[in-house]
Image: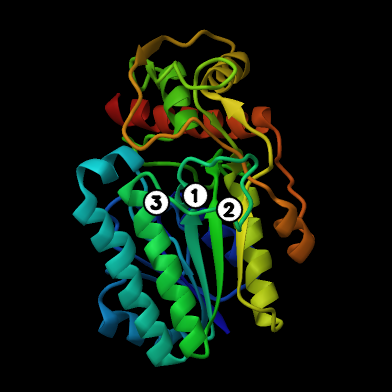
């Protein structure tokens, strides 16, 4: 048995690759390197540069590596960008995923794990958000992911393939061992941007929106450490392989922090002040999103290892300091 990781050179995908490789799994990676970084993948793992929509290529990978499970990370993830470029998001996140799922069905792959998002819920009326909450996405990003969920569910009803749909809340942090992290320079993740600002890689941290209906007026999110997130994927993989039914689960910790609280934690961990600029709300952003994680605990009996904001920030900051050190060494 072997696992194909799509987008395995990317932020979450590279963490997944290290996790599975370290557990002795046979894996292969496909990534077009549009945002992924090849050096962040574990050494010695078969890597194919290519597109998930290339059905002939993916079919050959499945045959060559005897793939029994696909973990699908490849896609576009920036909410405001999806508002400006909706067709790109439907092409990458929906059309590309449909092609990949079709290839898996044709090749008889029995397990498919999909990285979805809490953006599928839109602006929730009740917090925390459970898996049976209404799905009314506010952005093309959320809609493109929800459409893929539907494609996967309909496909599983008609063909012998089981799925794990994982709705991520806000993924942050970096590998505690320093092997990989969020490496896209223009990434919009709050904790990465704050760590870039405090290390001098960007001039300031911009806070978008200070008039939300939250305790301090800034957006509240449920931040989950990337290493805990890939651990959930590994648990879902084992669950499906043991005969578990298809499932859809939230991936978060069940508590939220505001943008200002995150900024304060970055200042505390770094031991220095951030330069902050205020700006209007961004299109597609929501006031508050927090996960109900009861189903995650009940079905998988999963417990986090890195569930505190200080640890998340500390690992993210260590990664940004490494990036800056490498840049400085190259420039000198």
Residue linked to disc 1: 121
Q: Which residue is mark 2?
A: 133
Determine whether label 1 and label 3 are within 8 Å by CB: yes
Mark 3 falls on what kind of element?
helix
**Label 1 or label 2, whichever comes before in sequence order:** 1
Residue 61 seen in this snapshot: no
The residue wearing badge 3 is 142
Q: Earlier in the sequence, mark 1 or mark 3?
A: 1
Give residue 103's position: percent from left, percent from top.
35, 84
| Tags 1 and 2 touching, CB below 8 Å | yes
Quarter of the image where the N terminus is located: bottom right
Q: Residues within 10 Å of mark 3 (few under 14, many from 20)?
A: many
Q: Residues within 10 Å of mark 1 (few under 14, many from 20)?
A: many
Of labels 3 and 2, earlier in sequence is 2
Q: Nearer the viewer, residue 230 or 158?
A: 158
- Identify which residue is drawn at 45% across, 34% down: 286
Position of the C terminus by quadrant: top left
In x, y percent, where is residue 206? 37, 19
Q: Residues within 10 Å of mark 2 (few under 14, many from 20)?
A: some
Q: Is residue 155 above or below residue 171?
A: below
| Residue 40 in the image: above or below residue 254 | below
As helix, strand or loop, the secondary structure at mark 1 comes to helix
Q: Is residue 115 above or below residue 323?
A: below
């Amino acid at each position: 048995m072997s696992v194909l990781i799509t987008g395995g050179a990317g932020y979450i995908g590279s963490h997944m690759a290290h996790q599975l490789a370290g557990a002795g799994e046979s894996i292969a990676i496909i990534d077009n390197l549009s945002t992924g970084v090849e050096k962040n993948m574990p050494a010695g793992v078969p890597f194919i540069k290519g597109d998930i929509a290339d059905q002939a290529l993916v079919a050959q990978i499945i045959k060559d590596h005897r793939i029994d499970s696909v973990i699908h990370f490849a896609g576009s993830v920036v909410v405001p960008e999806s508002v400006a470029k909706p067709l790109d998001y439907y092409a990458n996140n929906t059309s590309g995923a449909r092609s990949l799922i079709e290839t898996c069905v044709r090749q008889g792959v029995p397990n498919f794990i999909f990285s979805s998002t809490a953006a599928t819920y839109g602006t929730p009326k009740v917090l925390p958000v459970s898996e049976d909450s209404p799905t009314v996405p506010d952005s093309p990003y959320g809609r493109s992911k929800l459409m893929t969920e539907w494609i996967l569910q309909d496909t599983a009803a008609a063909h012998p393939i089981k799925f794990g749909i994982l709705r991520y809340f806000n993924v942050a942090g970096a590998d505690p061992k320093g092997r990989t992290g969020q490496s896209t320079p223009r990434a919009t993740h709050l904790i990465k941007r704050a760590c870039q600002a405090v290390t001098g890689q960007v001039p300031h941290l911009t806070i978008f929106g200070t008039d939300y209906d939250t305790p301090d007026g800034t957006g509240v999110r449920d931040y989950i450490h990337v290493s805990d997130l890939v651990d959930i994927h590994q648990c879902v993989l084992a669950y499906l392989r043991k005969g578990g039914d298809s499932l859809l689960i939230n991936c978060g910790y069940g508590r939220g922090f505001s943008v200002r609280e995150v900024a304060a934690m970055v200042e505390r961990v770094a031991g220095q002040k951030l330069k902050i600029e205020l700006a209007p709300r961004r299109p597609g952003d929501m006031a508050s999103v927090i996960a109900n994680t009861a189903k995650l605990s009940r079905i998988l009996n999963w417990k986090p290892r890195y569930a505190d904001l200080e640890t998340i920030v500390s690992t993210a900051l260590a990664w940004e300091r490494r990036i800056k050190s490498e840049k400085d060494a190259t420039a000198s």
